[in-house]
Amino acid sequence: MLNLTTTYLGHTYQFSSLKSLLAKANEEKSGDRLAGIGAESVQERIAAKEILSELTLQDIRNHPLLSQEEDEVSRIIESEVNEKIYSSIQNWSVAELREYILATETSGEDLKRISRGMNSEMIAAVGKIMSNLDLIHAANKLEVQTKCNTTIGQKGVLSSRLQPNHPTDNVDGMIASLKEGLSYGIGDAVIGINPVEESVESVKRLLHATHDFIEEWKIPTQNCVLAHVTAQMKAIQQGAPADMIFQSIAGTETANRSFGIDAKLLEEANELAKVEGTGTGPQRLYFETGQGSELSAEAHHGIDQMTLESRNYGFARYYDPFIVNTVVGFIGPEYLYNNKQVIRAGLEDHFMGKMHLIPMGVDICYTNHTKADQNDIEDLGVLLTTSGVNFIIATPMGDDCMLNYQSMSFHDVATLRQTFNKRPSPLFEEWLEKMEIVRNGELTQLAGDPTIFTR
């Protein structure tokens, strides 16, 4: 039996289960309150954190939140645990795990080793007793490199997804936006379009347009159209040139079913990308996540949104993706109410992703009814850059004209690189130098001028 009782400031707090304890130890999130599982007071949250810090990793593993018998995400996460490494750390308390992660003598390679012996709930648990600075410091230790057509994730590299969406999927409008983004040095992680229409014909048209532009200008990057995985698969089978296959994923089997996917379908997609896709690999999948999706699908099983997000990354790890990003702040204030919650969630997600050895990126964003503004997401951009985030999503002027939300702009990413001495991925930077957009790591006078692609 777990000891889930403590006395704090003369009041005794007792929690009914590990599931309840993890939820109440979470930093305040409006989604947890909406689900009726969050802490009722700061004092209750502190008491929950205290108890959680004293539990061992074995305690957490021996009390699953969602059994393998009823959930394939749980089965996949458990199948990935390295039993030999787990046996060497199973008696560590969550507090001892935190101390090990943050210790000066603990390297990124040390963290990679122990991560293979941990499940997603353990990683979420330690994140809950970390401060924002803890999350930044820990994540920055980890370098996770992946390769599709090009390699990203190197230390000192800040990559970006160029998101040239258009409200009618107009190819000319998309290409105009694409040219502007490239002229700021954006797009080394992927040129990724969210289509308005998810028909196979629309996906094929956008894939051909981006592929042809990449080929014409010999750009070392990857293309992707973020339609449902089945539409992309059909497009590829009909000859469309896709370097990667994309899909949104969730932390429970029932939530994934609400997305129209399961583990078997993703395996089929991965195999199709290897056989018929245009990416050279070895990684060819792109996953997107975000705290609150399981709650919005009524598929959270009483588990808090941070722990569910960690399970996303355990599920993603199984497929060895090229990139993963959390769309932090996109769902809205029902799940992340204000700037403080959005910033905290972004740092949590990045840390948890990296601890799963995921090539982690973030769409630093907010919807217009959230209590946040552009300064807030610029702040988060700074914090994630210092955390060593693999990539950031960028849109024209930070305003996506199709999805109607606010994100980072092309020039924001360029400014973060300049301020923190970060570079694009090596092959992409060589191309930028050849195009005279960059010289000696700095943007030239041509930066921001899309007409360089019409000369």
Image (cartoon, rainbow, N blue to C red):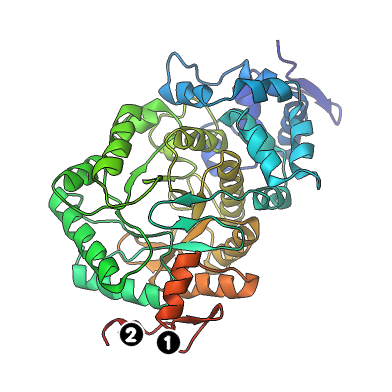
Quarter assignment of residue 272 = top left
Q: List the residue tagged with mark 2.
A: 452
| Nearer-N-terminus badge (1/2) | 1
Classify residue 192 as left or right of residue 216: right
Residue 194 percent coordinates (x, y): 30, 56
Quarter assignment of residue 253 = top left
Residue 126 percent coordinates (x, y): 69, 35
Q: Amino acid at mark 1?
A: Leu
Residue 224 visible from this viewpoint: yes
Residues packed near mark 2 inside 10 Å, few (<14), some (14 to 19) or many (20 plus): some
Between 166 and 333, the residue placed more toward the observer is 166
Q: Quick check: marks 1 and 2 in contact, CB under 8 Å?
A: yes
How many numbered discs?
Answer: 2
Between 130 and 204, the residue placed more toward the observer is 204
Q: Quadrant of the C terminus?
A: bottom left
Residue 150 percent coordinates (x, y): 42, 58
Label drawn at residue 446: 1
Residue 258 visible from this viewpoint: no
Between 288 and 237, the residue placed more toward the observer is 237
Classify residue 254 as left or right of residue 242: right
Residue 399 percent coordinates (x, y): 40, 68
